[in-house]
Image (spheres, rainbow, N blue to C red):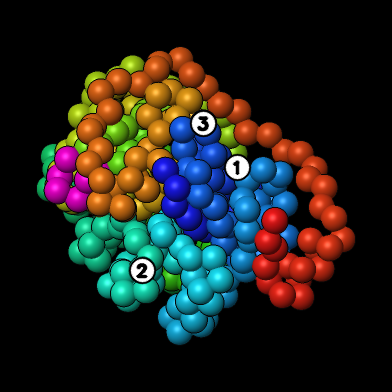
């Protein structure tokens, strides 16, 4: 398939961004034959220097700077490199891109994203109500707008509980002091509201899925987390056979008429064996490269859908395929370093 695809999310740290997995999925044999364009928010994002990953790199202004600088930069990149399909991978940029889908289409840039209504319906601050409409269980959750909410959460939820940002970051806290520290850390970057959520004991699962926008499920691959970071992210995992997880994901996609990728986070409690929905993330997870290894290349399928092509639903995936994240040093030439810092772009 000879098209040019641009994707954001090139960070690799304790919270690895999904763009690396998306690009790797599109690079496999039988994938994209056109140029892959990496869009970074930091010139030192690891994906800028990953060998064989992106043909071109451009630095974007942060979405917080507003719509105009973001779109102006995309127009510049499109004029130079011609973007056929754009895959945004970060929660904070998605509201802006979803609002501008028609503008991007006028530019000739295709996306495959949910409607504004679907996007809002699955947000963390609306999760309890959404789960109740589907008859699903969810942990007790409090929406907090100031530091006084810590005492109420401790009384209602008991320690430990999770402190979560509306877009990013989640920390398990075991004391008032720790909760205050994490609350201030999250709000310094993302502001209020913040969620305090009951910490359930059980087995955690994540499902990477792709919706067709009409309530149908194109594909879904569930994993169980084997290793979890301090922020609750999967550092390693393995695909599992669990029809309940797939049924829950189908219900979510159907209820939202979800268009595009999503990740459903679920915990199965140890005492009751009951499934509780934790979050619905509106983009590919960082571990999405595992999906193609298990037989469902969901990023590639999304590109085909964005181009208006018919994509039959995936029927199966391979169980027992796992991943483990690694950290390694990437070497870059002085010319690349100077190019991305002075001009905000690298062309290979």
Mark 2 or mark 3, earlier in chain: 3
Kindly state the secondary structure of the residue where label 2 is placed: loop
The image shows residue 340, relative to residue 295, as above or below, that is: below
Crowdedness near tag 2: few (<14), some (14–19) or many (≥20) residues, C-alpha within 10 Å? some
The image shows residue 224, relative to residue 256, as above or below, that is: above
Locate the C terminus by quadrant.
Answer: bottom right
Question: Where residue 125 sits: x, y (%)?
Answer: 31, 60
Q: Residue at x 45, y 84 (%)?
A: 68
Mark 2 or mark 1, earlier in chain: 2
Disc 3 versus disc 1: nearer the observer: 3
Q: Which residue is mark 1?
A: 230
Mark yes or no: residue 140 visible: no
Q: Which residue is mark 2?
A: 108
Q: CA distance from mark 2 to mark 1?
A: 41 Å
Residue stretch rendered in magenta on the structure: 211-216
Dominant SS of magenta comes to loop
The residue lying furthest to the right in this view is 334
Disc 2 versus disc 1: nearer the observer: 2
Q: CA distance from mark 3 to mark 1?
A: 35 Å
Q: CA distance from mark 2 to mark 3?
A: 26 Å
Mark 3 or mark 1, earlier in chain: 3
The image shows residue 141, relative to residue 342, as above or below, that is: above
Kindly state the secondary structure of the residue where label 1 is placed: loop
Crowdedness near tag 1: few (<14), some (14–19) or many (≥20) residues, C-alpha within 10 Å? few
Q: Are marks 2 and 1 in contact (CB under 8 Å)?
A: no
Q: Residue at x 62, y 68 (%)?
A: 59
- Tell me where residue 92 sits by quadrant: bottom left
Question: Where residue 320 sits: x, y (%)?
Answer: 46, 15
Name the foreground residue: 304 vs 168. 304
Decide if residue 106 is on the left or right side of residue 339: left
Q: Which mark is residue 29?
A: 3
Q: Residue at x 29, y 47 (%)?
A: 305
């Amino acid at each position: 398939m000879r098209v040019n695809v641009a994707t954001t999310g090139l960070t690799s740290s304790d919270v690895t961004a999904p763009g690396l997995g998306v690009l790797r999925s599109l690079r496999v044999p039988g994938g994209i034959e056109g140029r892959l364009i990496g869009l970074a928010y930091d010139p030192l994002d690891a994906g800028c220097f990953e060998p064989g990953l992106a043909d071109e790199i451009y630095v974007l202004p942060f979405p917080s700077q507003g719509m105009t600088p973001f779109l102006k930069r995309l127009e510049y990149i499109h004029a130079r490199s011609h973007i056929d399909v754009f895959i945004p991978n970060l929660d904070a940029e998605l509201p802006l891109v979803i609002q501008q889908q028609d503008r991007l289409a006028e530019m000739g840039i295709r996306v495959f994203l949910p409607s504004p209504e679907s996007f809002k319906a699955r947000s963390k601050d609306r999760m309890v109500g959404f789960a109740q409409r589907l008859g699903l269980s969810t942990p007790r959750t409090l929406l907090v707008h100031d530091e006084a909410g810590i005492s109420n959460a401790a009384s209602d939820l008991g320690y430990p509980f999770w402190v979560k940002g509306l877009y990013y970051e989640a920390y398990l806290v075991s004391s008032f002091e720790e909760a205050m520290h994490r609350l201030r850390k999250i709000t310094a970057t993302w502001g209020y509201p913040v969620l305090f959520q009951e910490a359930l004991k059980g087995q955690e699962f994540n499902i990477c899925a792709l919706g067709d926008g009409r309530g149908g499920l194109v594909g879904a691959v569930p994993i169980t987390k084997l290793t979890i970071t301090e922020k609750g992210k999967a550092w390693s995992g393995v695909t599992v056979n669990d029809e309940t997880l797939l049924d829950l994901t189908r219900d979510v996609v159907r209820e939202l008429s979800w268009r595009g990728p999503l990740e459903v986070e679920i915990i199965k409690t140890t005492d009751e064996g009951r499934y509780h929905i934790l979050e619905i993330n509106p983009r590919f997870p960082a571990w999405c490269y595992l999906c193609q290894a298990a037989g469902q290349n969901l990023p590639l399928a999304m590109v085909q859908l964005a181009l208006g092509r018919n994509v039959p639903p995936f029927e199966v995936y391979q169980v027992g395929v796992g991943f483990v994240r690694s950290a390694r040093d990437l070497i870059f030439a002085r010319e690349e370093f100077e190019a991305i810092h002075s001009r905000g772009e690298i062309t290979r």
